[in-house]
Image (cartoon, grey):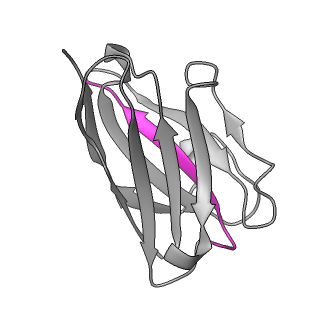
Amino acid sequence: VQLQASGGGLVQPGGSLTLSCTASGGTLDYVAVGWFRRAPGKEREGLSCIGSRGSEDSSYYVDSVKGRFTQSRDSAKNTVYLQMNSLKPEDTAIYYCAARWGAGALGANEYTYWGQGTLVTVSS
């Protein structure tokens, strides 16, 4: 499975962006998908994960994004989305999606498949 994260860009504080994680060479229906980011000068951080199709209720968010970020699936488009609202300057980072067999997880070392990142810049 090859993944590609897209949808990043420049947004003002308080604004919104929707990131997409699209797969080729396989379906995302049977895997859990996680979102991660790496801010300048910081280590990679796990943000959220969504369970495989039918287990979307097994979704998790870290406290820093809970209530602001929402994940969803579109099986027809083989895509998982990360809707990001109320963005803050500290959300500036390269965002990555990753996939794994089994339940969702927030640890990066638990993921097998990774996509190239997309840059999100939150600035006025």
Say whether residue 1 is magenta.
no
Q: Position of residue 61 (x, y in %)?
A: 65, 32
Q: Quadrant of the C terminus?
A: top left
* Image: magenta residue range: 29-40
Q: Can residue 110 be seen in this view?
A: no
* 86 vs 3, nearest the viewer: 86
The residue under the point 53% across, 82% down is 26
Q: Position of residue 5 (x, y in %)?
A: 36, 56
Q: Is residue 12 visible?
A: yes
The single residue placed furthest to the front in the displayed view is: 15
From the viewer's perspective, is 87 left or right of 10? right
- Quarter where residue 74 is shown: bottom right
Q: Position of residue 106 (x, y in %)?
A: 63, 40
Q: Position of residue 115 (x, y in %)?
A: 38, 60
* 35 vs 106, nearest the viewer: 35
The residue under the point 73% across, 56% down is 51
The residue under the point 61% across, 53% down is 72
Say whether residue 34 is magenta.
yes
The residue under the point 60% across, 73% down is 75
* 3 vs 122, nearest the viewer: 122
Tally of numbered tags: 0
From the viewer's perspective, is 43 left or right of 53? left
Relative to residue 111, is residue 88 depicted above or below? above
From the viewer's perspective, is 76 left or right of 39? right
